[in-house]
């Protein structure tokens, strides 16, 4: 071997050595323990009773799947109504070690950062309750959505309200043949709020109920805000309001509270309809302070989220789960009124 | 020729000095941040809001990388050890821990000490039995005995009859923890000479409906709730600060607790300085990691007694600012 060959040989070995060293330095350490499923659940706020109830069910469903070979840790955090904060929480969860993310977005149009971070770390994401736009869900094949069709809940709310009014003509207190109504909307520009509002009113009109809108108020899906808004409406319209259609039960319950505080007897109050099927709302329907709600089947959605989470972690086939376009699981809403409320209260 | 050589040598020297300077700079800037894992039970729980804010702010100031572990219930030393082992594999440099309940935790922490990774305990010390003794580990926490004692003295001063003939229900956090044992003891000592009765005591367990638990107990005049989660739940279901005929006094470390006090749903709050606890625990770890002969030290943080009317005083506003 000539000196030149020796030199070449040495340089080649040096390159290999440097390459190997750089590999050990750059590689991210894999901390994933196969026996431990770490699920990060991130909600849009800690103050939404429906989401909290759903999160509790997701957690208990996942815990029920623990076995000798798989321990489950479910960490629940909240974005405090701030998408940037939610993005940071997801980043922290990924940094601490996470196998599957379940995300209830603050802003359904802004999942990009979460998707990017999850994709970089190969962590599947199951969005729930607030549906990202389809283009975002198509970015990667490990993105899923579990929820309901908001339009269906609006239609059902309109149907039960129309049916109630037909069966109870006394709802039209001033006897003018029109129902003076107020809308309690979740958030301005929120897709679910728009769908629920539009479809609810449209369905009532299709069912030949003549309506006259007195006012609409945004109350951020929140009971206290709705109570405040409705108290102001009571001051403004007194007993003119005959119907309150609310985008969710929390706001409907706020309306009930406002009438209670204003000293109105039940017969003097408007009829009130919500959506979600919260326990408080079901009890209100049972007691007659609300006339109906639409049951958002959180148990079914939580069951599917838990099933998907475990399947994705174990790399099992998810074909049998009935996902539309391999992405969506849409649960069915159910109507609740005074006649069937006992079923939902488990009586 | 000689002159050329000299010029060449000077140029070489300058180049060597420059190269050394840049190499030093590159390595100086390339020092990896030390990584500190934080293990808290139910890390997403709102009770940790102030603590986590303090931890994060201090980590930023002290140039440490904080890993807040994803956790749910940590019911035993074994649960905590599994989380620690995972982070040891993750090659963290130090730990900040809230100790798991039970007497086994001390052995588990001795094991962690053998791994040559420094750690600080926060919010409470290790449970060493019904007659708690200091474990000797560095701990950044409030005086838990004083919290219970303070709540007792507040009950006495707020009750028109000095608690004469009154019945009290006590809800504390998890059993077999230093915080619960000391808080209850502090409360009992404060009430010792009063003509009142502690009708029942309850240690909160995970996943229990605290309202159902209280509903099943006999009625009392006051409820002393020394667990934030239980306080927030009961406060939410109270009417004008009264739940099932009982006025609510308690320990609250979340924004929700403060909102409930503001809304009159809770009568009195004792709030430990969660932000300070978080901040100083990171500072301790930073000193241990960067100073060769430093020994970790314990710190005791203050607690504040707050009534609704105090909420907008300068002192309390400053204190609560850290929770936001």
Image (tube, coloured by chain):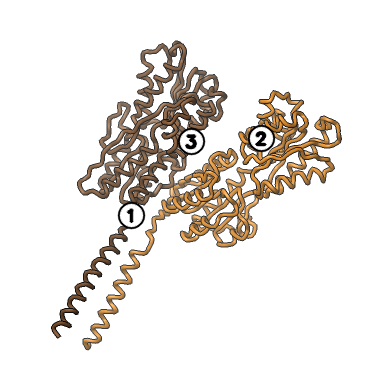
Chain colours: A orange, B brown
Nearest to the observer: residue B167 or residue B144: B144
Considering every residue shown, the one lying at the far front of the view is B3
Chain at numbered mark 1: B
Nearest to the observer: residue B45 or residue B10: B10
Element type at marker 2?
Answer: helix
Residue ID at (37%, 63%): A27
Q: Nearer the viewer, mark 1 or mark 2?
A: 2
Q: Is A276 left or right of B246, judged from the image as shown?
A: right
Chain at numbered mark 3: B
Instruction: Establish if A147 lies above or below B267.
Output: below
Q: Is residue B79 visible?
A: no
For the residues tagged 1 and 3, is the chain the same? yes
Nearest to the observer: residue B205 or residue A206: A206
Q: Which residue is mark 3?
A: B255
Instruction: Establish if B62 lies above or below B236.
Output: below
As drawn, the label of residue A229 is 2
Q: Is residue B64 visible?
A: yes
Q: Is B103 left or right of A277, judged from the image as shown?
A: left
For the residues tagged 2 and 3, is the chain the same? no
x then y, percent, for residue A105:
56, 49
x then y, percent, for residue B102:
35, 34
x then y, percent, for residue B312:
47, 30
Q: CA distance from mark 1 to mark 2?
A: 50 Å
x then y, percent, for residue A235:
71, 29
Tell me the crowding category of disc 2: few under 14, some 14 to 19, or many 20 or more residues within 10 angstroms, Cα based. many
Residue ID at (20%, 46%): B293
Quadrant of image for the C terminus of chain A: top right
Tell me the crowding category of disc 1: few under 14, some 14 to 19, or many 20 or more residues within 10 angstroms, Cα based. few
Chain at numbered mark 2: A
As drawn, the label of residue B33 is 1
């Amino acid at each position: 071997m000539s000196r030149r060959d020796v030199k070449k040989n040495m340089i080649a070995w040096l390159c290999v050595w440097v390459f190997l060293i750089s590999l050990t330095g750059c590689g991210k350490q894999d901390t994933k323990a196969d026996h431990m499923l770490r699920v990060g659940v991130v909600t849009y706020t800690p103050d939404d009773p429906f989401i909290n109830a759903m999160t509790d069910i997701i957690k208990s469903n996942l815990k029920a799947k623990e076995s000798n070979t798989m321990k489950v840790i479910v960490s629940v955090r909240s974005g405090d109504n701030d998408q940037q904060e939610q993005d940071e929480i997801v980043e922290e969860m990924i940094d601490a070690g996470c196998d599957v993310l379940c995300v209830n977005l603050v802003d359904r149009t802004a999942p990009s950062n979460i998707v990017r971070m999850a994709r970089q770390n190969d962590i599947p994401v199951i969005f729930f309750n607030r549906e990202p736009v389809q283009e975002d869900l198509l970015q990667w094949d490990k993105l899923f959505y579990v929820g309901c069709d908001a339009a269906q809940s609006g239609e059902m709310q309109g149907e039960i309200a129309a049916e109630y009014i037909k069966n109870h003509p006394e709802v039209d207190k001033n006897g003018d043949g029109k129902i003076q109504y107020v809308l309690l909307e979740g958030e301005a520009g929120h897709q679910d709020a728009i769908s629920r509002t539009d479809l609810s009113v449209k369905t009532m009109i299709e069912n030949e109920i003549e309506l006259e809108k007195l006012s609409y108020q945004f109350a951020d899906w929140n009971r206290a805000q709705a109570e405040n808004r409705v108290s102001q409406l009571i001051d403004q319209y007194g007993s003119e309001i005959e119907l309150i259609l609310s985008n969710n039960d929390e706001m409907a319950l706020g309306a009930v509270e406002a009438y209670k505080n204003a000293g109105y007897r039940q017969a003097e109050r408007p009829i009130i309809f919500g959506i979600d099927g919260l326990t408080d709302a079901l009890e209100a329907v049972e007691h007659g302070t609300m006339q109906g709600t639409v049951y958002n089947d959180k148990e079914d959605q939580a069951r599917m989220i838990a099933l998907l989470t475990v399947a994705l972690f174990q790399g099992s086939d998810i074909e049998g789960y009935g996902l539309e376009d391999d992405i969506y699981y849409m649960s069915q809403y159910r109507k609740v009124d005074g006649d069937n409320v006992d079923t939902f209260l488990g009586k | 020729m000689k002159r050329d050589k000299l010029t060449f040598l000077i140029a070489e020297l300058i180049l060597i000095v420059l190269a050394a300077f840049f190499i030093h700079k590159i390595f100086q800037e390339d020092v990896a941040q030390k990584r500190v894992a934080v293990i808290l039970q139910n890390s997403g729980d709102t009770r940790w809001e102030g603590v986590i804010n303090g931890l994060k702010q201090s980590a930023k100031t002290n140039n440490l990388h904080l890993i807040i572990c994803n956790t749910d219930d940590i019911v035993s030393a074994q649960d905590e050890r599994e989380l620690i082992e995972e982070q040891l594999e993750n090659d963290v440099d130090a730990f900040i821990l809230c100790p798991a309940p039970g007497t086994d935790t001390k052995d588990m922490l001795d094991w962690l000490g053998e791994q040559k990774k420094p750690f600080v305990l926060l919010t409470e010390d290790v449970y060493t039995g019904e007659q708690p003794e200091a474990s000797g580990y560095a701990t950044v926490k409030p005086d838990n005995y004083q919290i219970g004692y303070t709540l007792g003295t507040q009950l006495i001063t707020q009750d028109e009859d000095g608690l004469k003939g009154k019945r009290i229900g006590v809800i504390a956090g998890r059993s077999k923890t230093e915080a619960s044992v000391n808080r209850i003891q502090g409360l009992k000592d404060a009430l010792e000479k009063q003509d009142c009765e502690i009708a029942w005591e309850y240690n909160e367990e995970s996943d229990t409906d605290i309202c159902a638990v209280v509903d099943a107990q006999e009625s009392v005049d006051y409820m002393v709730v020394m667990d934030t989660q239980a306080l927030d739940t009961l406060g939410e279901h109270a009417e004008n600060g009264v739940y099932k005929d009982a006025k609510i006094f308690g320990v609250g470390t979340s924004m929700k607790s403060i909102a409930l006090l503001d809304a009159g749903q809770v009568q009195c709050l004792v709030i430990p300085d969660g932000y300070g606890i978080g901040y100083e625990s990171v500072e301790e770890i930073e000193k241990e990691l960067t100073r060769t002969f430093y020994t970790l030290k314990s710190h005791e943080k203050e607690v504040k007694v707050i009534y609704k009317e105090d909420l907008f005083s300068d002192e309390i506003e400053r204190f609560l600012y850290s929770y936001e």
